[in-house]
Amino acid sequence: MTDLAALTRAYIAAFDARDPSRIAPLLADGFALEDPVVKRIEGRDAALKAMAGIFASCETLSFSARHIFVDGDTTLIEFDLHLDQTHLKGVDVIQWRGDQMAELRAYLDIPK
């Protein structure tokens, strides 16, 4: 049985480290990323490129989980994200296929 909480923590650590090479093995080939800024991106390479863009857009980044919930093949991350002087709170909903993410939907309040 796959330990989705451990895989979710590995994703959080890799994102916090701004390390696409650690994120890539966690993403399925047909991975889809959805959030209020990028809307929807399909494909592992396109999603990794979008994440690399986030990493390059700021001098400081901190991504941490306040809570992780697991239900079947879905994990929820209640998170805090600091990008330079901007603090965002939100929830990531991750749909897993085995030990890889099939889809990540991020829900957060983007400052206007």
Image (cartoon, rainbow, N blue to C red):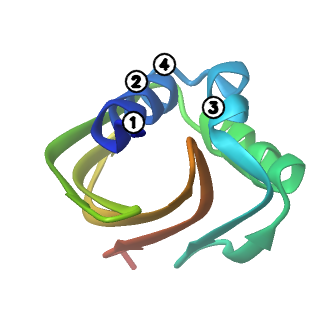
- Between the residue at mark 3 and the residue at mark 1, the CA separation in whole angstroms equals 21 Å
- Of discs 4 and 3, which sits in the foreground? 3
Mark 4 or 3, nearer chain start: 4
Measured from the top left, where is residue 48 in percent x and y? 76, 43
Disc 1 residue type (three-letter): Asp
Q: Is residue 1 above or below residue 73?
A: above
Point out which mark residue 32 bears: none
Task: State how far apart marks 4 and 2 are (Cα).
Answer: 6 Å
Q: Pointers 4 and 2 in contact (CB under 8 A)?
A: yes
Query: How far apart in space, not on screen, are marks 3 and 2 (Cα)?
Result: 9 Å
Q: Residue at horizontal 72%, vertical 37%?
A: 52
Q: Earlier in the sequence, mark 4 or mark 1?
A: 4
Contact? badges 3 and 1 (CB < 8 Å): no
Q: Earlier in the sequence, mark 3 or mark 2?
A: 2
Q: How many marks?
A: 4
Residue 99 falls in image quadrant: top right
Q: Earlier in the sequence, mark 3 or mark 1?
A: 3
What quarter of the picture does the C terminus occupy? Answer: bottom left
Does residue 42 appear to the left or right of 13 in the view shown?
right
| Disc 4 from disc 1: Cα separation | 14 Å
Q: Which mark is residue 17?
A: 4
Per the rendering, the mark at residue 23 is 3
Q: Which label lies toward us, 4 or 2?
A: 2
Q: Who is closer to the viewer here, 31 or 54?
A: 31
Foreground tag (4 vs 1): 4
Of marks 2 and 1, the one in the foreground: 2
Determine the secondary structure under disc 4. Answer: loop
Identify residue type, mark 3.
Ile
Classify residue 108 by image quadrant. bottom left
How far from the left and from the top, in percent, is residue 5? 28, 40
Q: Amino acid at mark 4?
A: Ala
